[in-house]
Image (tube, rainbow, N blue to C red):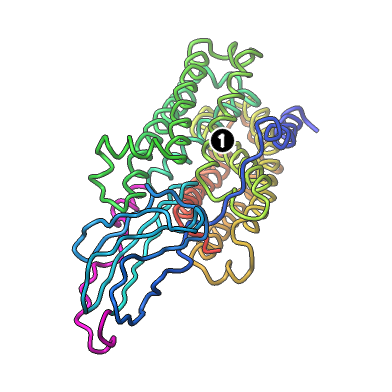
């Protein structure tokens, strides 16, 4: 077993220990949903009720609940008497007869996901004789806002993979890459995109949580409101870790290959890597289910494996292969092939744990939109693995010839094509992953 593979395995195996030292995450559940209401939706009442009681499947904060009339007026919300933290009372407007309808929305305190619905009941007349339905439509974020949030998450995942995987590639396989302009530019681009995507996600997540529009994501009050919530704190922590990553990156750019071999710099790079991976996983669904600790550990391993694979793949395709230097190919390509094999094993194993943790059953996998997205991601990942298999086969059968021919372009070209195919399909996998994060697992 090579030194590179031993280090990668050690990092994967130490993950549970790191979590034990950092503290196990608390149990979390699926997105907050309405369990019942009193009066019930669709009820025929002889007398107008003075209030409406809403009961949710988990504790809710009053500030995270909005209830609106058909005209858009916000109704007062308070704790329900003799109710728990999961029940609230809504003061209703006076209504003698006709149909009264309200729309409600609640923000999940764990991940910022917004759930909403509509409740209507008839007062003083049968439903068939009641007046027309004047209730406002069920509130929902604008499609453009949802698209922008998915795009920001996609950019964040890609930047994370390129930065973490790129640093690991330079440290473990190619120290000279710290002095190569292409790899340096890739790391700078990844850091810039990661920081910008995180800052943008704060505004977009804030607007999404309040069921607003794309313009709301640019308002300072949206940032301020979200930063007072748990998802906002996580995003702010991620932004701060990206700022700290600038110190690590700056030292590498200034010192070059010598810095990449420094134990002190490697400790700093490892700390930044852990922070970026952990804060990224905290905004997903990994802690949902019966075993949130193992879900969080599996998510960390999943993100780490994906970063080592994708980031290394990008450095290999954009910085190593264009040089076509025989000695580099002889050392770097086999090393990355082994590292990628370990990473893929970690991705698959952790992915199985996450799928069972979040989806929970075969029925949910086959009959929910979240399950369909997960199956789509699995199918695209299978195509990526086929391309990776072609790359590995080239390493086994053609690498020696490429080295003998001093990196001949015609000999290396098939390997470049398979690497390019892997890279393109990986971008699709990241896009589906971004959709999964904003989707409701529907447990």
Location of the C terminus (image quadrant): bottom right
Q: Kindly identify which residue carries mark 1.
A: 277
Looking at the image, which residue is at 67% across and 44% down? 293
Write down the region rendered in magenta: 123-149
**Residue 6 forms part of the magenta stretch:** no
Looking at the image, which residue is at 63% across and 44% down? 296
Looking at the image, which residue is at 64% across and 29% down? 332
Residue 5 vs 214, above or below: the answer is: above
Residue 84 vs 122, above or below: the answer is: above
Q: In the figure, residue 402 lies in which quadrant?
A: top right
Q: In the figure, residue 413 lies in which quadrant?
A: top right
Location of the N terminus (image quadrant): top right
Question: In the depicted view, which residue is nearer to us: 256 or 130?
Answer: 130
Compared across the picture, whether 150 is left or right of 15 comes to left
- x and y percent of residue 105 in the render? 36, 58
Looking at the image, which residue is at 26% across and 89% down? 128
- x and y percent of residue 439 in the render? 46, 57
């Amino acid at each position: 077993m090579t030194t590179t593979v031993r280090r990668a395995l050690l990092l994967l195996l130490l993950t549970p220990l790191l979590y034990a030292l950092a503290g196990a995450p608390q149990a979390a559940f699926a997105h907050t949903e309405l369990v019942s209401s009193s009066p019930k939706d669709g009820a025929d009442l002889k007398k107008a009720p003075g209030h409406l009681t809403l009961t949710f499947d988990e504790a809710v904060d009053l500030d995270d609940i909005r209830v609106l009339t058909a005209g858009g007026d916000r109704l007062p919300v308070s704790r329900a008497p003799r109710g728990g933290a999961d029940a609230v009372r809504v003061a209703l407007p006076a209504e003698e007869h006709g149909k009264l309808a309200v729309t409600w929305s609640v923000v999940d305190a764990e991940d910022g996901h917004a759930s909403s619905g509509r409740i209507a009941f008839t007062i003083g007349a049968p439903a068939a004789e009641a007046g027309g339905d004047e209730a406002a439509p069920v509130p929902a974020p604008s499609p453009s806002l949802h698209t922008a949030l998915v795009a920001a998450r996609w950019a964040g995942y890609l930047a994370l993979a390129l930065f973490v995987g790129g640093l690991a590639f330079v440290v473990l396989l190619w120290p000279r890459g710290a002095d190569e302009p292409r790899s340096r530019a890739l790391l700078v681009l990844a850091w810039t995109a990661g920081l910008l995507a995180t800052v943008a996600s704060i505004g977009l997540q804030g607007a999404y949580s309040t069921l607003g529009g794309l313009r709301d994501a640019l308002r300072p009050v949206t940032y301020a409101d979200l930063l007072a919530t748990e998802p906002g704190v996580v995003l702010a922590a991620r932004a701060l870790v990206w700022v700290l990553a600038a110190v690590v990156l700056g030292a590498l750019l200034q010192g070059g290959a010598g810095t990449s071999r420094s134990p002190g710099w490697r400790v700093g790079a490892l700390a930044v890597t852990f922070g970026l991976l952990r804060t990224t996983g905290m905004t997903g669904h990994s802690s949902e289910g019966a075993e949130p600790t193992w879900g969080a550990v599996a998510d960390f391993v999943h993100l780490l494996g994906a970063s080592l694979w994708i980031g290394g793949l990008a450095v290999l395709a954009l910085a190593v292969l264009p040089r076509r230097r025989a000695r580099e190919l002889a050392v770097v390509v086999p090393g990355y092939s082994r590292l990628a094999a370990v990473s893929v094993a970690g991705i698959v194993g952790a992915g199985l744990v996450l799928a069972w943790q979040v989806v929970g059953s075969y029925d949910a996998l086959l009959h929910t939109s979240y399950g369909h997205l997960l199956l789509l991601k699995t199918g695209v990942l299978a195509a990526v693995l086929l391309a990776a298999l072609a790359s590995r086969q080239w390493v086994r059968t053609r690498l020696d010839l490429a080295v003998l021919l001093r990196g001949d372009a015609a000999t290396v070209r098939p390997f470049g094509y398979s690497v390019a195919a892997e890279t393109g399909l990986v971008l699709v996998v990241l896009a589906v992953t971004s959709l999964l994060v904003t989707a409701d697992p529907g447990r």
